[in-house]
Image: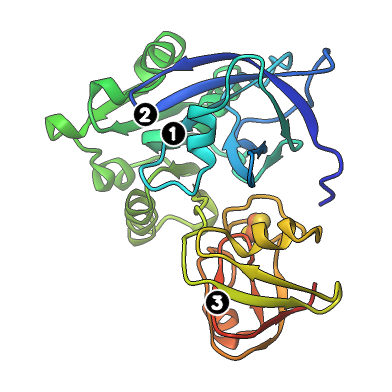
Amino acid sequence: MSHANTILVRVSAIEPLTPLIKRFALSPAAGGFLPAFSGGSHIIVVMRGATRVHRNPYSLLSPPNLLDSYQIGVRRMEVSRGGSMFMHDHVRIGSELEITHPVNLFNLDKLARKHILIAGGIGITPFMAQMEDLRAGSVPYELHYSVRGPEHSAFRDRLLERHGARIRIYHDSANDFIDVEGLLGNQPLGTHVYVCGPAGMIEKVVGTARIAGWSGSHIHWEQFSAPPVGDAFDVFLAKSGVSVRVPPDQSLLEAIEAAGVDAPYLCRGGVCGECRTKVLEVDGVLVHNDHFLSSEEKESGRAIMPCVSRAQCTKLVLDL
Ligand code: FES
């Protein structure tokens, strides 16, 4: 993907939704409208700080038919490499940011006879836009939304107002949890399930659906990983002829970009496969953190996803 075509946007509204989540409205700086998108799409927000550039993926949560601005929800992460803190602490109304064009890696299945949506915490965001699409159609849907407690249920009023009895909100603080087995155990043929939230929730829903005999094509999940920190290492980009030092708190992809080399990406979360890069040489181990490569590919040591994966080595040579 070429990133030359980012869109310059201006922050037109900021609203705290919960103690941890803020909603940002992003309007095109040049006026007019933003590109069309479908529910489940995300954008990458480019944040140019004083010392480094952050590029974080965020789901679009505004109704897909409103294109004078996009809305995103940003959760302040307890362990942050800086992107969510930058959005919370430095971005103001009037700030300018760049965004990429929307990409949808979490589509609703058009042939589904029923949709069950399961969200945990900030994982509600892709469903906000998806449910606007569903509300306009005739296929039944329901949302099961789990949060820590009432003060953390972002969008509660809007959800209940727009979708009424199709919404069920669960509060951990009241020991009220989603009965995943019960929910998935008795659904009409042709039902699709979608889950977005913490890793444990995704594993639980996907595992339960598989055990209950759901077809893999009816199970959908979105799990963007944040690039983990790790030891510093050096990489040589063979095609570009550039040596890059990857510091502990920067991803391999970020370090490559900071060195002025344009590398492909779509999700920056280890999901889409766009950044897959051939490993030409490594004198240590690759630390794979993606959800894209198969276990065999990971073991072979011949490919890496630089958006989330790194290496423990003294010499890594990539075909870039
Ligand atoms: S950019 Fe999507 S897997 Fe790396």
Question: Spatial distance from mark 1 to mark 3, Cα to Cα?
Answer: 28 Å
Label drawn at residue 20: 2
Specify the amino acid type for callout 1. Arg
Label drawn at residue 75: 1
Tell me the quarter of the picture where residue 272 sits. bottom right
Q: Residues within 10 Å of mark 2 (few under 14, many from 20)?
A: some
Which residue is denoted by mark 3 in the rendering? 311
Q: Is residue 246 above or below residue 123?
A: below
Specify the amino acid type for callout 2. Leu
Between 266 and 82, the one nearer to me in the picture: 82
Q: Secondary structure at mark 2?
A: loop
Name the colouring of the figure: rainbow
Q: Residues within 10 Å of mark 3 (few under 14, many from 20)?
A: many
Specify the amino acid type for callout 3. Ala
- Which badge, 2 or 3, is on the more N-terminal residue? 2
Quarter containing ligand 1?
A: bottom right
Q: Position of residue 206 (x, y in %)?
A: 39, 55
